[in-house]
Image: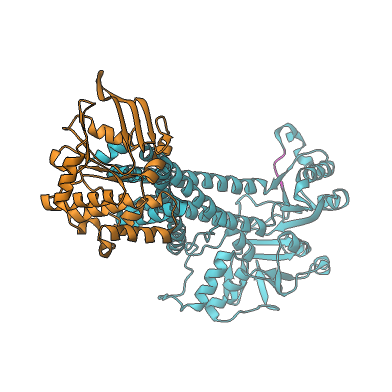
Amino acid sequence: MNLWNAIVIGFKEIWAHKFRSVLTMLGIILGVSSLVAMSAMVKGIEIGAKEALVAIGGLQKIRIEAQKVPIYQRYLTDQAVGVTLNDVYALQSSAPLAALVSPEMRLYGATVSANGKTYRPWVCTGVWPVAIEMYEHVVEHGRMFNEIDDEMARSVCVIGTEVRDEIFGSPQQVGHEIIPLGETININGQSLTIIGMFQHYENEQDRKQRELALQQAEPNKTGPARSRGWGTTSQNWAFKLKNASVLIPLNTIWIKFRAGGTAGPGGWGATVAAADPRLSVLEVKVAEVEHLNAALQQIRNVLMSTHKGIEDFYFRTQEEWAENIDTFVRNARMSGSIIAGISLLVGGIGIMNIMLASISGRIREIGIRKAVGAGTGAVFIQILVESVVIAVVGGLAGLAGSYALVRSMSSFSPTGNDPVITVTAMAIAFGFSVCIGILAGLIPAFKAARLDPIVALRYE
Amino acid sequence: MSLVELRNVSKIYHLGGEEIRALDNVSLDIESGEFISIIGPSGSGKSTLMHILGCLDSPTSGTIKLDGTMIQGASPRELARIRNRKIGFVFQFFNLLPKLNVLQNVELPMVYSGVSARERHERAVAALKMVDLENRSKHRPSQLSGGQQQRVAIARALVNSPKIIFADEPTGNLDTNTGEAILQLFCKLSREGSTVILVTHDPEIAAVTPRRIEIRDGKIAEKVDARLAGLDRVARTF
């Protein structure tokens, strides 16, 4: 008996017991589809998390922040100068591994007012023009301020789309995009001219949803106009942060606002009255992420010299974030795989159970087949093929089911990251289901093949 | 050379420490083309003899030669091959596969001998023609009468042109008239040159065969070469 005959008999056997076969397959179907769907979800989360990591500058970015003088140097506190522009010049001249150096003075608790509206941006910060590369900003309208604007401390600013949305109205509200170039806004009483606006930053998922919303009719929002809060937006905070920022030349913010240093005693949101010439943050980008450790060492050496050995600064990198993403993805994938794998295993046990029941119901048939000349191998292969056919059909149905599952999952919770079905996951799930089918068929096939034809023929 | 040669064949079962000699030192020759009946009461060992002759079972001791091949000590796989090519079985309870139609049932032995689908079909139709059932080929066994089912089983036994056809109480489940018709079919096969062995407990049925082997307590108690009596009976029937 060749394999093709065995496969045909296997299909006939499944067809003869449709309901039972579907029930048997259900375990495999659910196992495969949950394995694929789980992997798709984790992949979606991974992609979303990495998008956000790239949006804030990626792994190459090192942030240097001021910190309290360590206890063993406490007596030197009055000599600690903090992170200043001196450090920036020193790094530029002495730390070749630091490709970009971007000083930043923040205006905490800034309030933007114009057009009869007020808005508190998430970030209102004085920077050098290099910040545009540091934060991977893209100026879509107008221009970024340049070195001359900075040198002259001109009253100009570049804003994110969120600021525009809140002050002048968003495209969704007014129906067309407002480009507020040349408009004057007030920040804490100082007038600044908008000379540029960034593009709207969002992740793939949000972009798709926004485009979908444009096509569909506006949902029925009744009652007075109001902010509907954060809950309904799935906007990633990294993108939100970039959209809700106002960039001002470093000199301007120092001369006009006397801003700088770390957050005041009231923390974030409290207006700092006292002038503070220190930098809030110093961002450094290394050319190659492989040289991160060497670059850190170099930067530390330079800063230790400018700070006269007082360690009143520390480094913050995105390594942990990236590692956290990897760890999370690995953990989620592993726990998901274990659960889905167990359900596949249960499906396999279901197949074995049914095959065992099936052969005890077919002892006489096996006896007859043996009497007319079916060898041990032929019977073995027939039962094994039947089991594999169930698993293969179940596996294919499971792959189809995984599409449905993923689609229904993303329609039930559209705020999450869009699940991404990968071919690898499908191949692994399908291969696993076939292996399960083979394993589940082995024992029943062995039992059937070993039946004594005389006993089997007499079996009632 | 005989078609089948049994020499000093014994089959011993052990049941709860008790030794049961189902066959005790049996020697037997069967020539090609013979029409034989094996008779004996239940428990006499006739089924064991048929199983050993039919390659369904191996003896505990002794030698069997079938069509020039020694088959004692053959592996289950080789036995299956011999059953497939050289032996046809007809059972008391027909033993057709209920899920297959008549044609597929007849094709079954050829599935295991690797015959192509087209040839399987042709040979199965030819075999069904021999038992006058070619117009029932798409029926399920359950849609046929007992006699028809037994004829399908005979067609299945014939389809691989075996050396020997074994019939184990072939009329045991049929009424007298149908049983008679089935017996006539075996007589016809015998006249056409097949080697047919009838296993029965009924001396009346055994009377149709020229040679009768009576078995009692695992021994061939009597070898009745009743050619004349048998021929009388055949002459009377036809």
Front-most of residues B211 and B205: B211
The answer to whether residue B74 is above or below residue A253 is above
Q: Name the spot of residue A357 as percent of width and height, x first.
A: 30, 43
The colour mode here is by chain
Answer with the quarter of the image where residue A397 lies.
bottom left
Answer with the quarter of the image where residue A356 lies.
top left
Please report the bounds of the magenta region as a residue range: A65-69
Q: Is residue A149 left or right of residue B83?
A: right
Rendered colour, chain A: cyan
Front-most of residues A146 and A387: A387
Q: Does the magenta stretch include residue B152?
A: no
Q: On the rendered image, what quadrant is the C terminus of chain A found in?
A: top left
Q: Name the spot of residue B72 as percent of width and height, x first.
A: 39, 30
The answer to whether residue A221 is above or below residue B16 is below
Rendered colour, chain B: orange
Report the residue that reaches farthest toward the front: B228
**Which residue lies at the image location 38% right of the left edge and 60% below the top edge?**
B121
Q: Name the spot of residue A175 as percent of width and height, x first.
A: 55, 81
Q: Name the spot of residue A346 as percent of width and height, x first.
A: 39, 44
Report the residue that reaches farthest toward the top: B17
* Residue A135 seen in the current view: yes
**What is the count of numbered marks?**
0
* Residue A196 seen in the current view: no
The answer to whether residue B47 is above or below residue A175 is above
The answer to whether residue B61 is above or below residue A274 is above
**Which residue lies at the image location 39% right of the left edge and 57% below the top edge?**
B120
Front-most of residues A192 and A354: A354
Q: Main secondary structure of the magenta part?
A: loop
Front-most of residues A342 and B214: B214
Report the residue that reaches farthest toward the left: B176
